[in-house]
Image (cartoon, rainbow, N blue to C red):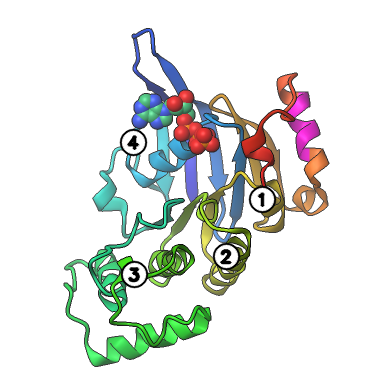
């Protein structure tokens, strides 16, 4: 359903700063796949998500969803198929608007015409129920400005906004990394629930190897713009952090032991 074929992306081409961020990457996600993506700093993980979201276009290669070629489709035109949650709790929501207005906007993105800020009473009920189901204590705060919420609450809301419209692809870009461990754990558990509930096809970047192992059915490891390791569903069930470190060492001839970011919890 998501098809990336021989994708290449180089920044500052032809200059001394030239950087090949994505180097001949091919990846296929089947319906309902949940792929976790790990890799060292600068490996190309965020660039990969940006290419899928249409924030960036590749120099070469093809990106398709359901056989629809989206390689050069602008971000706003593919946003109805793609939900995304960022690392920064401030990103992805409108801070000066209320919770219900933000949810109405998210809904509007998937319709041909936006719904605007107005929220009908039946819509309010629907939003309240969705928030109640998430168990984040936001259901009685529909008219609270989003800028007043804590980081964890905003990430929960962002996750809801990115998923309740059932996008074809969900992109999670280190969405728990800026939270304290308890909140990160809570958002991880909500993530598992919403992805299961809607059977979403998901790609999640994380620096937390335990999280990469505990979520999803497949795992890829990137380094220097390439996918250097891939575990399918059966392999992933048996994987340990030690296996991942060994796989990196084997593929790259160097150790990940110095990469504090990748080893952080
Ligand atoms: N917009 C850009 N302009 C120029 N160079 C970029 C841009 N975005 C990314 N890069 C470079 O491309 C390479 C890959 O970056 P990317 O952010 O995709 O890595 P990453 O795996 O997400 O890293 P991290 O884990 O540190 O966030 C890096 O060398 C980065 O400096």
Choose the circle earlier in sequence order: 2 or 3.
3
**How much space separates mark 1 and mark 4, taking CA atoms?**
25 Å
Q: Secondary structure at mark 2?
A: helix
**In-front residue for pair 31/238:** 238
Q: Nearer the viewer, mark 2 or mark 4?
A: 2
Q: Residues within 10 Å of mark 3 (few under 14, many from 20)?
A: few
| Percent coordinates x, y for residue 110 in the rendering | 29, 66
Residue found 45% across the figure and 69% down from its top:
153
Q: Quadrant of ligand 1?
A: top left
Q: Which residue is under mark 3? A: 148
Q: Answer whether residue 6 is visible to the viewer in this image.
A: no
Q: Which residue is under mark 4? A: 56
Q: Which residue is under mark 2? A: 183
Q: Nearer the viewer, mark 1 or mark 3?
A: 3
Q: Is disc 2 in contact with disc 4, using a CB cutoff of under 8 Å?
A: no
Q: Answer whether residue 225 is visible to the viewer in this image.
A: yes
Q: Residues within 10 Å of mark 1 (few under 14, many from 20)?
A: many
Residue found 51% across the figure and 52% down from its top:
178
Choose the circle earlier in sequence order: 3 or 4.
4
Q: Which residue is under mark 1? A: 212
**How much space separates mark 2 and mark 3, taking CA atoms?**
17 Å
């Amino acid at each position: 359903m998501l098809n990336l074929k021989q994708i290449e992306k180089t920044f500052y081409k032809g200059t001394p700063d030239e950087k090949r961020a994505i180097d001949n990457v091919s990846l296929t996600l089947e319906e309902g796949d949940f792929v976790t993506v790990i890799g060292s700093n600068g490996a190309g993980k965020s660039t990969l998500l940006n290419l899928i979201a249409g924030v960036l276009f590749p120099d070469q290669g093809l990106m398709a969803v359901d056989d629809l070629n989206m390689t050069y489709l602008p971000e706003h035109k593919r946003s109805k198929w793609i939900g995304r949650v960022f690392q920064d709790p401030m990103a992805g929501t409108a801070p000066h608007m209320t919770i219900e207005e933000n949810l109405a906007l998210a809904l509007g993105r998937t319709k041909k015409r936006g719904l605007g800020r107005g929220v009908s009473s039946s819509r309010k009920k629907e939003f309240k129920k969705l928030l109640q189901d998430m168990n984040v204590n936001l259901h009685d705060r529909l008219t609270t400005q989003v800028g007043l919420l804590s980081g964890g609450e905003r990430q929960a809301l962002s996750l809801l906004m990115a998923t309740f419209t059932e996008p074809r692809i969900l992109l999670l870009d280190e969405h728990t990394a800026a939270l304290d461990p308890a909140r990160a754990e809570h958002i991880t558990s909500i993530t598992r629930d919403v992805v299961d509930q809607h059977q979403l096809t998901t790609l999640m970047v994380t620096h937390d190897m335990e999280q990469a192992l505990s979520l999803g059915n497949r795992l890829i490891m990137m380094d220097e713009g390439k996918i250097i390791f891939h575990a399918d569903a059966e392999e992933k069930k048996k994987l340990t952090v030690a296996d991942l470190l060994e796989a990196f060492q084997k593929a790259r001839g160097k150790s990940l032991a110095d990469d504090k970011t990748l080893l952080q919890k």
